[in-house]
Image (cartoon, helix red, strand yellow):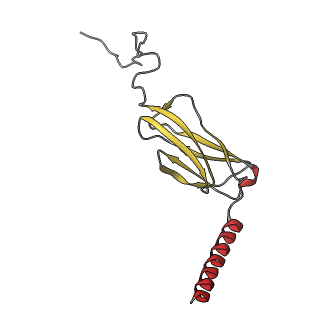
Amino acid sequence: MKTYQARRAGFGLTAFTAVAAATVLVAPQASALVQSIAVSGTTHYVGTPYTVTADVTATSFLFKVTFTDNGTQIGEPVAVSNGKATITWTPATAGTHQIKAVQELISSKTVTVEVAEKPTTPPDGGAGSGSADLGGLLTGSAG
């Protein structure tokens, strides 16, 4: 009976070692890393498109980058080209947005972006000259 238990324990240990070795062999290289993430623009508004760019190490071109906004995926995973992955992001809501770039569950970086509602007044505050060009709409005579 003791021999049977020893064989069983030995088989379990051998199986565990084989699985661990296989996992190490198929694991992605640690050098595949997202180095940074940036969002274009300095002021961000709801409904306005922005470019999100992730800089990744040169050896990580085999792994696509997935972008998320507060945990919700933005578009489809993006292939890396020349050490960068980019996507267009259009915020749908005002408030704080955590934009994250994840590369095949190996590495990620996050940037926080504050998004505001679009202003409803013109940039000059709505102040005009007080005159209007009627473009010839008033023709004829009063009589």
Outermost residue to the front: 2
Residue 123 picture location, percent across and down: 47, 19
Q: Nearer the viewer, residue 109 or 67?
A: 109
How many numbered markers are drawn? 0
Residue 8 picture location, percent across and down: 59, 84
In percent of the image, x 62 and y 88: which residue is there? Answer: 3
Outermost residue to the left: 143
Q: Quadrant of the C terminus?
A: top left
As drawn, 106 above or below 43? below
Residue 105, located in which quarter of the rendered image?
Answer: bottom right
In percent of the image, x 57 and y 31: which residue is there? Answer: 41
As drawn, 133 above or below 45? above
In percent of the image, x 75 and y 54: which residue is there? Answer: 59
Q: Nearer the viewer, residue 1 or 69?
A: 1
Residue 26, located in which quarter of the rendered image?
Answer: bottom right
In percent of the image, x 59 and y 88: which residue is there? Answer: 4
As drawn, 78 above or below 1? above
Q: Quadrant of the N terminus?
A: bottom right
Q: Nearer the viewer, residue 104 or 65?
A: 104
Residue 80 picture location, percent across and down: 68, 52
Residue 137 picture location, percent across and down: 36, 20
Question: From the viewer's perspective, is 4 left or right of 119?
Answer: right
As drawn, 79 above or below 43? below
Q: Nearer the viewer, residue 83 or 87?
A: 83
